[in-house]
């Protein structure tokens, strides 16, 4: 479970969660309280910026972390991007949906393997790869 909010409130929540050693809390090193109502002003600014950007039709469905459903409509992209600023991430539901569609291989792009680790907790059957840089991209390309 991930919670977001004002720094002191999150610290207090972690302390309460750890009380009696029932669970362990970790403060994530992030630059903002993503995916909660504190990000609404940033979402509003994002909406204004996105309003002037033209989009093409989607070639592949994209599962939104806002509703854990596939989107194929360019008309929904901007609204979903704005919503993800201040709405909870439906990670587990999104991954379960993707797996239910027969996806057996996933690639995490970016530094680290945090998302791969989270996927492993949902399904041990998914084959996971990671691309962090040009070297790892070439290694993956040569492996296929």
Image: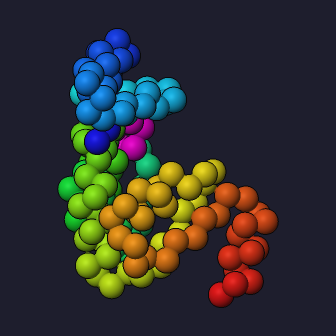
At 28% from the left and 58% from the top, the residue drawn is: 92
Q: Which residue is pictured at 30% across the width and 29% down the height?
A: 21
- Rendering coords of residue 101 (x, y %): 28, 81
| 53 horizontally vs 14: left or right | right
Q: Is residue 16 above or below residue 109?
A: above
Residue 62 vs residue 17, the one in the foreground: 17
Rendered residue at 30%/35% (across/down) = 23
Instruction: Look at the image and name its color scheme.
Output: rainbow
- The x and y percentages for residue 110 are 60, 54
Residue extending furthest toward the top: 8
**Residue 61 pos. (x, y %):** 34, 73
Please report the bounds of the magenta region as a residue range: 46-51
Q: Is residue 19 visible?
A: yes
Left or right side of 43 for 137:
right
On screen, 105 above or below 11?
A: below
Residue pictured at 67% horizontal, 58% vertical: 132
Q: Is residue 50 magenta?
A: yes
Q: Quick one: which residue is furthest to the bottom in this view?
A: 144
Total residue callouts:
0
Measured as percent of width and height from the top left, residue 68 is found at 24, 60
Along the line of sight, the residue nearer the viewer: 132 or 73: 132
Instruction: Decide which of 94, 37 is in the foreground and name it.
Output: 94
Magenta stretch secondary structure, dominant: helix
Q: Is residue 54 left or right of residue 102?
A: right
Of all residues shown, which one is farthest toward the front?
20
Quadrant of the drawing holding the C terminus: bottom right
Decide whether residue 144 is among the magenta residues. Answer: no
Q: Let me know if residue 13 appears in the view.
A: no
The quarter of the image holding the N terminus is: top left
- Residue 99 occupies which quadrant of the picture? bottom left
Say which of 87 and 56 sits in front.
87
């Amino acid at each position: 479970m991930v919670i977001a909010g004002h720094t002191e409130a999150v610290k207090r929540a972690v302390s309460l969660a750890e009380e009696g050693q029932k669970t362990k809390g970790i403060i994530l090193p992030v630059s903002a309280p993503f995916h909660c109502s504190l990000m609404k002003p940033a979402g509003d600014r994002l909406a204004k910026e996105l309003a002037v950007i033209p989009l093409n039709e989607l070639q592949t469905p994209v599962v939104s972390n806002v509703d854990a459903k596939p989107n194929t409509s360019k008309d929904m992209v901007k609204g979903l991007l704005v919503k993800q600023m201040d709405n909870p991430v439906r990670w587990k539901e999104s991954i379960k949906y993707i797996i239910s569609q027969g996806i057996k291989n996933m690639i995490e792009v970016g530094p680290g393997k945090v998302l791969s680790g989270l996927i492993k907790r949902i399904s041990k059957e998914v084959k996971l790869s990671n691309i962090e840089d040009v070297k790892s991209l070439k290694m993956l390309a040569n492996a296929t």
